[in-house]
Amino acid sequence: MPHLIRTKRPAAYEGGQYEAFKAAADHGKDKGNYNVLAGLTTGWYLPTLGQWFDLARNIGEMTLDTSSPDHFIESYMDMFYWLDNVGTPLDKVNATMSKIDADFIDKFDRNEWIWTSTVSATEYAYVVNFTNGERLSSSKVLNTFSCFGNPKTGFYHVRPVLVF
């Protein structure tokens, strides 16, 4: 998608209408080994909603509790989340980065909302967040994997991915 946007809408891309895609594409250019990595990888890109979900499930080892429909909530057409009993995906994703040089690590934070490249409506795109499903009290549970459509002008984090 970013490649198509850069080639089909270059003026809009350079004019700041696709800030999240641009931030992902430019990520790491200030690092000394950028050109070496760029030749060995896909380059940095903004993951889709499905790719973030896969990351939470596969790398974060998030389990989906299907024992009760209360564990999955769809609030609106473009907002959903899993609650409780899903493990500790945030900690597990951060643990996978333990072998990376400390200068290159930017660990995930609790309740950090992250842009995806998936559109939810013309002027909206999805943002995601995943935590460890901590129980805040006997009746409140922190969402574990959350997603909602947000206006593209919103201020959220960009977490590009590099695939070898």
Image (spheres, grey):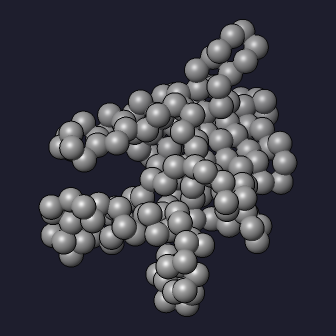
Residue drawn 63% across the image and 16% down it: 135
Which residue in the rendered view is the most extreme toward the bottom? 8
Which residue in the rendered view is the most extreme toward the right? 76
In the rendered view, does 106 fall on the left or right side of 121? Answer: left
Residue 16 in the image: above or below residue 75: below
Which residue in the rendered view is the most extreme toward the top? 138
Residue 83 in the image: above or below residue 48: above
Q: Quadrant of the C terminus?
A: bottom left
Residue drawn 42% across the image and 58% down it: 160
In the rendered view, does 78 fall on the left or right side of 64? Answer: right
Residue 122 in the image: above or below residue 5: above
Residue 4 shows up from this direction: no
Q: Quadrant of residue 25?
A: bottom left
Residue drawn 39% across the image and 34% down it: 92
Which residue in the rendered view is the most extreme toward the front? 15
| Of the pair 71 and 41, the residue shown nearer to us | 41
Residue 82 shows up from this direction: yes
Residue 136 x/y as whole percent: 65, 15
Q: Quadrant of residue 162?
A: bottom left
Residue 46 x/y as whole percent: 48, 63
Residue 69 x/y as whole percent: 79, 34
Residue drawn 52% across the image and 31% down it: 110
How many numbered circles are shown? 0
Residue 15 x/y as whole percent: 55, 77
| Of the pair 146 and 31, the residue shown nearer to us | 31
In the rendered view, does 87 fall on the left or right side of 84? Answer: left
Q: Quadrant of residue 49?
A: bottom right
